[in-house]
């Protein structure tokens, strides 16, 4: 859905997408009659039930940026505070002039942002890495593992050569043959590649690459 120009309101605030942007779904937890969930997500935000959900999961990697006009009403205090949640991938940057707090909840998979009461931010923005930036970050992550890969393969090569030398001197078959060493080397490389992918994913690199 593309809610460009539409305003979403609850008892403590209003949010309006100011550029064409895509979402999987949008849900507003109205304070009355005090619902417990919307779109399968909990309304309670730690203070009250004034929570809005803008689910961009699946669209953020092509959208790259989401921009909103956010108005937090003056009565947004105490148990009634304006909190927005954005289920989806980890953004590379969140920009806002009236933000009280913002953090990504890895357990629930959403960005949560709270705004100062009685203020308006005409350009609250959520940005995701470009593909080029993602590739750069991936290269940085990969470079950390290169020495480890070299050490692993070097150790394997040295062990194989020692085994062959010992076999030549003693006539006893080596405990590892070149063919076996090759297979182990392939397994080691695959293992390190998996480690790199996990590290890249944990750091949000693959998200920036659109993977």
Image (cartoon, rainbow, N blue to C red):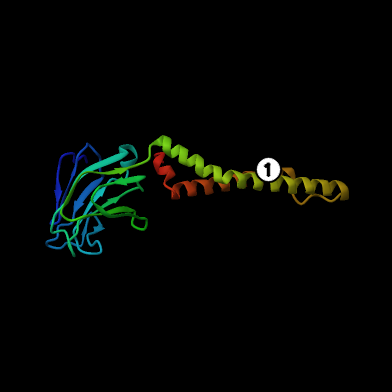
Label 1 residue SS: helix
> Which residue lies at the image location 14% right of the left edge and 60% below the top edge?
31
In the rendered image, is residue 15 in sight? yes
**Location of residue 176 with respect to 129 vertically, above or below:** below
Q: Quadrant of the N terminus?
A: top left
Q: Quadrant of residue 63?
A: top left
Question: Could you say which is closer to the camera, residue 61 or residue 123?
Answer: 123
The image shows residue 165 at horizontal and vertical percentages of 82, 46
Question: Could you say which is closer to the camera, residue 187 or residue 59?
Answer: 59
**Location of residue 137 with respect to 85 vertically, above or below:** above
Which residue position is annotated with label 1?
Answer: 182
Q: Is residue 211 left or right of residue 62?
A: right
In the rendered image, is residue 180 in sight? no
The image shows residue 25 at horizontal and vertical percentages of 23, 47
Q: Quadrant of residue 22?
A: top left
The image shows residue 107 at horizontal and vertical percentages of 36, 58
- In the rendered image, the residue lying farthest to the top is 132
Q: Quadrant of the C terminus?
A: top left
Question: Could you say which is closer to the camera, residue 134 or residue 157?
Answer: 134
């Amino acid at each position: 859905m593309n809610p460009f120009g539409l305003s979403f309101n609850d008892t403590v605030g209003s949010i309006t997408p100011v550029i064409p942007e895509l979402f999987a779904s949008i849900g507003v937890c109205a304070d009355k009659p005090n619902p417990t969930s919307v779109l399968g997500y909990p309304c309670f935000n730690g203070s009250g039930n004034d929570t809005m959900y803008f689910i961009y999961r699946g669209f953020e990697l092509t959208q790259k940026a989401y921009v909103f006009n956010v108005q937090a009403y003056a009565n947004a205090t105490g148990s009634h505070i304006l909190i927005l949640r954005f289920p989806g991938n980890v953004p590379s940057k969140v920009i806002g002039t009236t933000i009280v707090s913002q953090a990504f909840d890895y357990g629930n998979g959403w960005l949560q942002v709270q705004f100062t009461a009685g203020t308006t931010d005409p350009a609250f923005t959520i940005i995701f890495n470009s593909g080029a930036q993602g590739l750069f970050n991936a290269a940085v992550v990969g470079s950390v593992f290169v020495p480890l890969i070299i050490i692993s393969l070097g150790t394997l090569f040295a062990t194989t050569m020692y085994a062959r030398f010992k076999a030549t001197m003693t006539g006893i078959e080596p405990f590892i043959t070149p063919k076996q060493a090759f297979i182990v080397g392939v397994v080691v490389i695959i293992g390190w590649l998996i480690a790199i992918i996990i590290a890249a994913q944990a750091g949000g690199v693959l998200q920036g690459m659109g993977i």
